Image: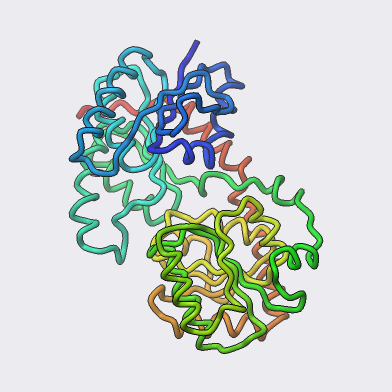
Amino acid sequence: MKKVLFVASVIGHIKAFHLPYLEMFKQKGYEVHVAAYSDNDEENIPYCDKFYNIKFNRSPFRLATIYAYKQLKRIVKTDQYDIIHCHTPVASVLTRFAARNCKNTTLIYTAHGFHFFKGAPLINWMLYYPVERYCARYTDKLITINKEDYDRAKELTLRKSGESYYIPGVGLDLEKINAINIDREAKRKELGIPINAFLIVSVGELNKNKNHKVIIEALFNINNPQIHYVICGQGVLKDYLKDLIKKHGLENQVHLLGYRKDIIEINKCADLFAFPSRREGLGLAALEAMACGLPIVTSNVHGIIDYSQDGITGYNCNPNSVKEFKIALDNIFKEKTKRNEMGSYNIDYVRRYDLQNVKLLLQEIYSKPKKKVPI
């Protein structure tokens, strides 16, 4: 029986993005293994025959990192995989080193967003680019999910053995999204949002990169009590954002909802999705919102600009510009006809990101023999 190993730093990444592909391998008769970190040694992972609980550490200079590397090396030597597919930065680096001498294994890495990109801090280029360039020599297939990263990957892999590919994201389950129907008024009542309010939604961890602050500042400048803003997520900046909301007197308009499992339902009772991140590999949350028929106001960076088209899908703005976000939010609030046109366009546009389309592309990549290039 053929074997495949999926590797990521945490099990949540596998469960959030890769279960359809574990299922795909099971259907093809593979024995499916997963290596990731979980708080639960008895982790139940659908379509997984064997789970290796490996505690990856974000710092390469910790003893835990050395131990994780040794675990991986032992696993790949013992199990003799046909395919290893790794994800997330630290896990992918350790996996490629651990499996570098496995000549009968096809080693695949999906970059969910390079940390070095146009406009990224210099330190990112100094730290991450040399590592990725070096690891390319051990990568048979390097998959990217946005076009800027794909152009960069071609530079990396053309210098070393391997081939680079572009796929439109990890797969958007449009069938599941379209099957969800809600009572708009009832959902708003549940969330504590006035029925006639103009509702903006953001989804993402409460951290500096997700940049929720800029939307709060923009709403303060708009000064329109009809506009309400809900943020779905948790994180280290919760208290900071609560203080900012209080400082601007927006307690009745801005709502921190914490972690939510009903994002699609919330999107379907909203009027606009805001996605002001400073960096994104792609941004599944924004694509889900587009599939729900929402216009989007986003930052104009990295993977987001693959789909965020200024004046068409919504508006995109400099992530540091409160003024640009203020104008964009205010325009969409005032232009109902334009807002509806953008939402309708977005429903049609995101079909290219559909899970079934991405699965077909990945099947082609998996089945293609690896390129034989001398190191």
Q: Quadrant of the C terminus?
A: top left
x%, y% of residue 260?
Answer: 60, 54
Q: Is residue 52 visible?
A: yes
Task: Tell which of 305 and 201 is nearer to you.
Answer: 201
Instruction: Please give the name of the residue rendered at 70% of the width and 69% of the height, measured from the top-left corner.
Output: 192
Q: Is 69 above or below relative to 270?
A: above
x%, y% of residue 7?
Answer: 40, 31
- What is the total number of numbered labels drawn onto the structure image? 0
Q: Is residue 313 visible?
A: no
> Seen in the image, is 144 located left or right of residue 132?
right
> Seen in the image, is 367 located left or right of residue 127?
right
Q: Is 70 above or below relative to 339?
A: above
Instruction: Please give the name of the residue rendered at 59% of the width and 70% of the height, measured from the top-left corner.
Output: 255
Instruction: Please give the name of the residue rendered at 60% of the width and 51% of the height, measured from the top-left corner.
Output: 352
x%, y% of residue 94?
Answer: 27, 33
Instruction: Please give the name of the residue rendered at 38% of the width and 14% of the height, measured from the top-left corner.
Output: 79
x%, y% of residue 49?
Answer: 52, 18
> Seen in the image, is 367 located left or right of residue 252?
left
Q: Quadrant of residue 280?
A: bottom left
Looking at this rendering, what residue extends furthest in the top direction? 1
Q: Quadrant of residue 70?
A: top left
Q: Is 294 above or below relative to 106?
A: below
Q: How is the image coloured?
A: rainbow
Q: Quadrant of residue 65?
A: top left
